[in-house]
Image (spheres, rainbow, N blue to C red):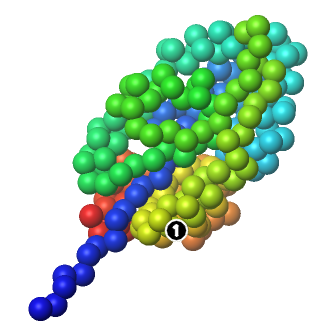
Amino acid sequence: MAIAERAQQTMVTLDLEGVLVPEIWIAVAEATGIEELSRTTRDEPNYDLLMRQRLAILIQHNLTMSAIAQVISTLHPLPGAKDFLDALRDKTQVIILSDTFEQFGRPFMRQLGMPTLLCHRLIVENDRIVDFELRMHNQKMHAVTALKALNYRVAAAGDSYNDTAMLATADAGFLFHAPDNVIAEFPQFPSLTSFSELLEHLTRALEL
């Protein structure tokens, strides 16, 4: 008697900011009037350089962690994000891979039903952000590589330069809400603009 072939287990990895929630640094820039903080990984591919610039700006403007936390407390997931994530998690496992920080991402996880978030950590002393600690360099790509080594079929979605290695490593990768410059530089990834589209493409890619 023939043994039935088992389908490969699946996993979706998603970026956070710009995909499920607003860009936090842009929100801080708008709330504080510090325009220089509006630069994100959509503009600067070098994440370490971008964060060093941000830390210098925080020091220059005497901006505290509690002031940033107050801005974050006013933010909510993007319209439709929670329903999309619920529908996706009903079909397969989901991990959020983000270059945000625990202190920034935690409030959003509560609003999104506590999905798994792998991200970095800020070093805060006396209410001042003095440094940051990367969980590991290029963590999104390494996480997808590890999941594939565990025999998962992986589909991924993100919007920025720092997502493209993750998309390329996954079995299927999609740009979502990406700016024109990223779309133009990475035409190999389908560019999607609605949660219904994204859910359809992820479902089809993983044969869910």
Residue 203 against residue 112 in the figure, above or below? below
Quarter occupied by residue 129: top right
Q: Nearer the viewer, residue 122 or 191?
A: 122
Residue 31 horizontal/vertical position (percent): 64, 15
Q: How many numbered badges does the structure rendering display?
A: 1
| Of 67 and 101, the residue lying toward us | 101
Which residue is label 1 attached to?
A: 149
Residue 45 appearing in the image = yes
Report the amino acid beneath label 1.
Ala
Q: Residue at x 42, y 65 (%)?
A: 152
Query: In this rendering, would 66 be left or right of 154?
Result: right
The secondary element bearing badge 1 is classed as helix
> Looking at the rendering, in which quadrant would you find the C terminus?
bottom left
Q: Residue sitting at 77 percent across and 13 percent down?
A: 125
> Is residue 43 something that shows in the picture?
no
Height in image: 123 above or below 126?
Answer: below
Question: With 175 as the anchor, is 35 left or right in this view?
Answer: right
Q: Is residue 51 left or right of residue 81?
A: right
Vertical placement of residue 37 versus 159, above or below: above
Name which residue lies at 86% across and 24% down.
56
Quadrant showing the N terminus: bottom left
Q: Is residue 17 above or below residue 62?
A: below
Residue sitting at the far bottom: 1
